[in-house]
Amino acid sequence: MSNSFTQQEFRNALGGFATGITVITTLGKNGQKVGMTANSFNSVSLTPPLILWSIGKNTNCFEDFMAAEAFAVHVLAEDQQDLSNLFATSGIDRFADLECNEGLSGVPILPHYSVCFQCKMAKQYDGGDHIIMTGEVVQFDDNGLQPLVFYRGNYHNL
């Protein structure tokens, strides 16, 4: 059965669901800092504490995340639109002007966020043109800041 809609129409319809914005970080296969913007973040389970996010198979840091032992999910605060855009840009050193702390397994932790979840990799699942990454939350820090929200292709504040 074929779809009666285009990929762009489907993407636009998905944009009707408001999401938070995250930056996911890890250490790459060669020990380099790796990070990307993602809005595909969700809770999975309280016991054990599990979260998920998804990464496109054509993402430039795909192999680094596939091989990662740990990662951090930074829920961005409402004043971090520029950081979201930075980590969505390809071909640059996204960490050049950031002083990160070192988290679980050496994963870079950004200096500012609303909430940060440090996770060890749990399981990965095929999801079409994406891989669904699940992580067991080992530690989190909640600064209680208002989140940056994404809706219909634009940033918003609550």
Image (tube, helix red, strand yellow):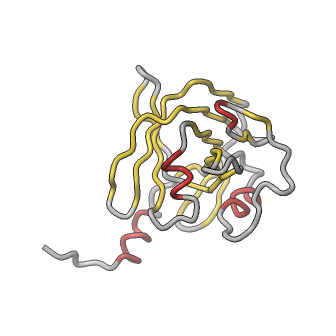
Q: Is residue 95 left or right of residue 97?
A: left
- Which residue does the image show at 41% across and 63% down from the upper left? 14
Residue 46 vertical position relative to residue 25 in the rendered view, above or below: above
**Nearer to us in this view, 82 or 29:** 29
Q: Which picture quadrant has residue 146?
A: top right
- Which residue does the image show at 49% across and 52% down from the upper left? 40
Q: Which picture quadrant has residue 27?
A: top right
The extreme left residue here reads 1
Residue 15 in the image: x percent, y percent?
A: 47, 64
Residue 114 vertical position relative to residue 53 in the rendered view, above or below: above
**Nearer to us in this view, 56 or 11:** 56
**Nearer to us in this view, 33 or 76:** 33
Residue 103 in the image: x percent, y percent?
A: 70, 32
The extreme top residue here reads 47
Residue 132 in the image: x percent, y percent?
A: 40, 49
Q: How many marks overall?
A: 0
Residue 18 in the image: x percent, y percent?
A: 51, 54
Residue 41 vertical position relative to residue 153 in the rendered view, above or below: above
Residue 74 vertical position relative to residue 84 in the rendered view, above or below: above
Position of the N terminus by quadrant:
bottom left
- Which residue does the image show at 72% across and 37% down from the upper left? 145
The extreme front residue here reads 30
Q: Is residue 83 left or right of residue 122?
A: right
